[in-house]
Image (spheres, rainbow, N blue to C red):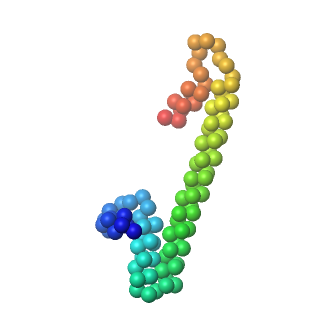
Amino acid sequence: MANLRAHSTAEMANHPHARLLEHIKLARQYAREGLGDTSILFFNRAIDHINRWMDCKKAIAEEVELAKQLDAQLNSHKEAPGTRRLSSVWLHILD
């Protein structure tokens, strides 16, 4: 709660999670005003926002595992001495 109050409105607009922070701020404000239904609506929007980020995190974690598998496969194919490893090429492409 303290972190939310520490941000000014201008700072929140530039924050990567501005919409999430705004939903939480409004939910708390409506709760203080006794508007429980509206408060719950905004809290649920915040939860939905977090769930979308969790889905993104899961997808990225799955992609990391695929990259690890690919790297392991590339490393399993030994190359002749003095030649460049394929996984090194792969890492340079990602940069």
Tell me the residue at 52%/72% (across/down).
45
> Please, which residue is most extreme toward the bottom here?
34
Q: How many marks?
A: 0
Q: Looking at the picture, how far across and down is residue 90, in whole percent?
A: 57, 30
Q: Vertically, is 22 above or below 62?
A: below
Q: Closer to the camera, 94 or 6?
A: 6
On the rendered image, what quadrant is the N terminus found in? Answer: bottom left
Q: Looking at the picture, how far across and down is residue 40, in whole percent?
A: 52, 79
**Residue 86 lies in what quarter of the image?**
top right
- Does residue 10 appear in this view? yes
Seen in the image, is 36 located left or right of residue 2? right
Q: Closer to the camera, 77 or 27?
A: 27
> Please, which residue is most extreme toward the front here?
2
Tell me the residue at 60%/57% (across/down).
55
- Does residue 13 appear in this view? no
**Residue 14 lies in what quarter of the image?**
bottom left
Q: Vertically, is 88 above or below 62?
A: above
Q: Looking at the picture, how far across and down is residue 56, in whole percent?
A: 57, 55
Tell me the residue at 45%/77% (across/down).
27
Q: Looking at the picture, how far across and down is residue 50, in whole percent?
A: 53, 63
Tell me the residue at 54%/58% (across/down).
53
